Amino acid sequence: MIRKLATVAALALVLTACGGTTKDSGAKPGGPSGATGAANAQAELKTGLKFTYLPKAVNIPYFSVVGKGVEQAAGEVKGEYKATGPSDASAASQVTYINTAAQQRQDALLLAANDQNAVAPALKAARAQGMKVVTLDSDVAADARDLFINQVDSTEIAVKQVELISEAIGGSGEIALLSATANATNQNTWIAIMKEELAKPKYVGLKLVDTVYGNDEDQMSFQKTQGLLQAHPNLKGIIAPTTVGLAAAARYLSSSEYKGKVALTGLGTPNQLREYVNNGTVKSLALWEPAKLGYLATIAAASLISGRITGAEGEKFTAGSLGEYTIGKKAEVILGPPTVFTKDNIGQFNF
């Protein structure tokens, strides 16, 4: 899938507040900000830049929304935008697209990685040819990219999901995790934090009995949900920290004997999960605004190319209408906290 553009209209999405950002007070949206280190914060953003957006896999609704944000930002800097990627969420498949982007002399690659280390050699080679690499959603080894745009603080989102499942099952019972791919950096980080949280005294009543992987494929996630319920007859709840997995699990539960008996929560877009929230299959879920993630990553990439920032800790840059951000440790930038969606508020969101 390839799209090029010179200018793009504003997103045809309702971008309501999905949590705050890490904006500093006094920032002027759209204008340069102060910065530390060697970067020149007053430098003009270059125009005509070429951006390639490489999600974990194409045709995943969540990543399509992220792509809308990339497209908007590319248009604002009068750049060219190309979205491409594999149909399967595998690292080996992504390597081919990384190499192609480098060969095509793209200025920046915006990548949601399927594996932290497997794609690193290709990324290092691409950077050696002058291409900037900005990861989003799921990171790679820090020495293989320039910046990581994290959708949310990892601890915050992991703890929130444990909190939501505990509330849904009354603080006691067996639970399981339905993840994406076994090597997904973000998923594994969240799962590790969830396990630490579950070990705390306040969650003594919760017992994690299984972790399975649906590979961010709808049918496989559907089958893994079915398998969990057959393998664990006393299961009380499932956490699916992946939009594909959560939607697939909700579809299975909603038409099975387990509806109302097995609780489900995780990370998903309101549009995908609205039906299941309204019919009671899912009491609550969480997420950030995916389009803003893509937008922030693209402006960050343009800022790198233009010399506004270098990726050093403490540097600041302005991401258009989102305001000012500060680069943290290991060249990480956090979009902002998540929003919890329930039957009471999910109708207010459209993404």
Image (tube, grey):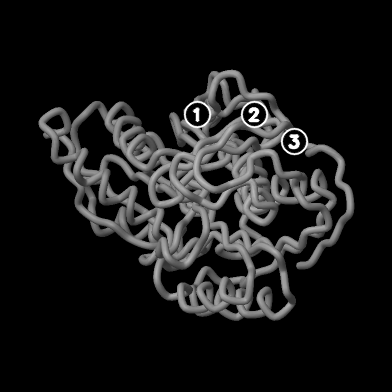
Q: Position of residue 292 (x, y in %)?
A: 63, 39
The quarter of the rendered structure image containing the C terminus is top right
Res 33 label: none
Circle 1: element type:
strand
> Mark 1 packing: few (<14 Cα in 10 Å), some, or many (20+)?
some
Location of mark 1 (residue) = 339
Q: Are marks 2 and 1 in contact (CB under 8 Å)?
A: yes
Amino acid type at mark 3: Leu
Q: Tell which tag, 2 or 3, sits nearer the viewer.
A: 3
Kind of element beneath mark 3: loop
The earlier-in-sequence mark between 2 and 3 is 3
In this view, 15 is above or below 86: above
Of labels 2 and 1, earlier in sequence is: 1
Q: In the rendering, at what x and y percent does residue 214 appear? A: 43, 62
Write the residue at 70% across / 30% down: 321
* Quadrant of res 167: top left
| Dot placed on the residue nearer the N-terminal end, 1 or 3 | 3
- The mark lying in front, picked from 2 and 1, is 1
Q: Is residue 22 above or below residue 176?
A: above
Relative to residue 131, is residue 18 depicted above or below? Answer: above
Kind of residue indicated by mark 1: Thr
In the rendering, which numbered label is found on residue 349?
Answer: 2
> Quadrant of the rendered structure where residue 212 is?
bottom left
Which corner quadrant holds the N terminus?
A: bottom right
Q: Which residue is mark 3?
A: 13
Q: Do callouts 2 and 3 mark residues in contact (Cβ within 8 Å)? A: no
The residue depicted at 46 percent of the width and 73 percent of the height is 120
The answer to whether residue 214 is seen in the rendering is no
